[in-house]
Image (cartoon, rainbow, N blue to C red):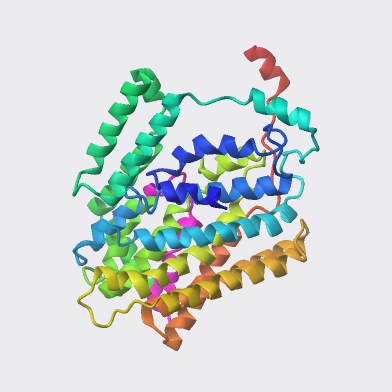
């Protein structure tokens, strides 16, 4: 549905912005929200897929998006990298990954955790009740529509630059001033709408990166990774397959925290550092890493964005973790790598005769990745439940798709080299095991307040 792709279309610098505005609207589609349009199962899928798209849309955002951190480093070789060398691969992967997330939520998550969502089922209502609900629906003021139109226009100007190169900040600040004048909003109202987490998270990430650089942490991490690549069963291909999944293995509340710290390490894999990779190979790995990184805040249990979706669907914490980590690992990372390999490199490095645009190959690999994911989900859905056997098969699916993701990443980076493909499969399996074991077997309800403490507070 178009609605689940709205965050990607907007591509704001933080998915929480649009999620905070639209998740309550999605809840209204259910019986408890008043519209009574969707069943319980449909509402779970809609909210979960929308949140997945939202908490990944910060990556391809041209307005301070997470992907611009990687584009800055790639700019040392690709002169026009800042124009968005990582944007299209991330958008392509997120669009298809959202669809696979919906499948996982529908056929796996609802069977693994059948009693852990408190949404009510759709109820039958009369036409008279529908008319009453329509009359009671809150009407948006004209200034609201004008503000929305100005904001959308500012986004389009920032993205497409129809009036030439204008700094993004200039366009957005001008739009904000016009909106404030039209709506007569005060400083207090404007400040209350600011979400500081992306800014503070990026500052924290750069502080961590600075601390690592000052204390030799990057050199230490580089040596550890070189040690992994020296293991014959892993090699450089297996080490890269693990590294691109590292932020799904360690999901934090905002992807900027680790991205700002780890992108310099990934940069050192290229010719500027340890020379594991050429510049083109580094761009492919950067694309796979970046989409995996930007979607990692969704399944984070440390105040991640996905908890907003769980709250709207009245689910226990951890309900969406399996679906979100699975698609980031098995769908989005390999698709971003393939897109970069067979399309974007030829656009951003046109002087290289070895680079070609091959849309048919992108389509074929997309069918393989999405088809394999869909078949795996379909097979698992036949036995999915809360039993130990079901969770064992759940982990088997993760490992199998992780191996496929590692193999496709290796093909994108090294071509059809048997040794590297095998090493990529091993690295993908290792990453998949680390991700799968963190998916909760049973969701634990939030602790209820102690009556005595409630009385004391009162």
Could you say where residue 308 lies in the image, as x and y percent from the top left? 56, 39
**Could you say which quadrant of the image residue 195 lies in?**
top left
Of 308 and 252, which appears nearest the observer?
308
Give the residue at x 77% y 41%.
121
Could you say where residue 83 lies in the image, as x and y percent from the top left? 25, 57
Could you say where residue 71 lies in the image, as x and y percent from the top left? 28, 58
Number of numbered labels in the structure image: 0
Position of 47 with respect to 334 (left or right) is right
In the rendered structure, does residue 123 fall within the stretch colored magenta? Answer: no
Residue 269's place in the image compared with 68, above or below, is: below
Could you say where residue 274 lies in the image, as x and y percent from the top left? 26, 71
Residue 167's place in the image compared with 176, above or below, is: below
Would you say residue 194 is visible in this rendering? Answer: no
Of 286 and 425, which appears nearest the observer?
286
**Could you say which quadrant of the image residue 237 lies in?**
bottom left
Position of 176 with respect to 109 (left or right) is left
Of 344 and 142, which appears nearest the observer?
142
Image quadrant holding the C terminus, namely top right
Give the residue at x 44% y 27%.
144
> Magenta stretch?
228-257
Residue 311's place in the image compared with 75, above or below, is: above
In the rendered structure, does residue 246 fall within the stretch colored magenta? Answer: yes
């Amino acid at each position: 549905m178009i609605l689940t792709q709205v965050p990607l279309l907007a591509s704001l610098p933080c998915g929480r912005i649009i999620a905070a505005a639209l998740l309550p609207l999605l809840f209204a589609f259910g019986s408890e929200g008043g519209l009574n349009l969707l069943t319980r199962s449909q509402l779970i899928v809609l909210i979960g897929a929308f949140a997945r798209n939202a908490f990944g849309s910060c990556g391809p955002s041209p307005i301070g998006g997470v992907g611009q951190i990687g584009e800055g480093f790639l700019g040392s070789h690709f002169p026009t990298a800042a124009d968005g060398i990582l944007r299209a691969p991330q958008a392509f992967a997120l669009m298809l990954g959202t669809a696979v997330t919906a499948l996982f939520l529908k056929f796996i998550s609802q069977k693994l955790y059948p009693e852990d969502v408190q949404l009510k089922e759709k109820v039958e209502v009369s036409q008279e009740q529908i008319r009453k609900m329509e009359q009671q629906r809150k009407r948006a003021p004209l200034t609201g529509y004008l503000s929305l139109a100005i904001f959308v226009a500012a986004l389009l100007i920032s993205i497409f630059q129809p009036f030439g190169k204008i700094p993004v900040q200039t366009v957005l600040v001008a739009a904000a001033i016009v909106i404030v004048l039209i709506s007569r909003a005060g400083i207090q109202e404007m400040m209350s709408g600011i979400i500081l987490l992306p800014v503070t998270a990026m500052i924290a990430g750069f502080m961590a990166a600075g601390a690592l650089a000052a204390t030799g942490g990057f050199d230490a991490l580089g040596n550890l990774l070189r040690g992994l690549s020296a293991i014959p069963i892993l090699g450089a291909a297996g080490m890269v397959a693990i590294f691109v999944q590292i932020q799904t293995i360690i999901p934090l509340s905002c992807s900027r925290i680790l991205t700002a710290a780890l992108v310099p390490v990934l940069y050192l894999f290229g010719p500027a550092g340890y020379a594991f990779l050429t510049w083109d190979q580094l761009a492919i790995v950067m694309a796979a890493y970046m989409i995996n990184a930007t979607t990692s805040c969704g399944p984070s249990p440390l105040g991640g964005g996905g908890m907003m979706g769980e709250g709207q669907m009245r689910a226990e914490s951890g309900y969406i973790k399996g679906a979100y980590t699975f698609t980031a690992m098995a769908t989005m990372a390999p698709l971003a790598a393939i897109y970069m390999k067979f399309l974007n490199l030829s656009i951003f490095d046109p002087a290289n005769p070895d680079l070609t645009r091959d849309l048919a190959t992108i389509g074929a690999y997309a069918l393989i990745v999405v088809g394999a994911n869909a078949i795996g989900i379909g097979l698992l859905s036949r036995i999915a439940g809360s039993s130990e056997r079901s969770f064992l098969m759940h982990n088997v699916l993760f490992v199998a798709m992780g191996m496929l993701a590692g193999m496709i990443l290796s093909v994108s980076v090294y071509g059809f080299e048997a040794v590297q493909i095998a090493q990529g499969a091993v690295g993908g399996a290792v990453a998949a095991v680390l991700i799968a074991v963190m998916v909760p077997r049973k969701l634990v309800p939030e602790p209820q307040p102690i009556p005595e403490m409630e009385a004391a507070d009162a």
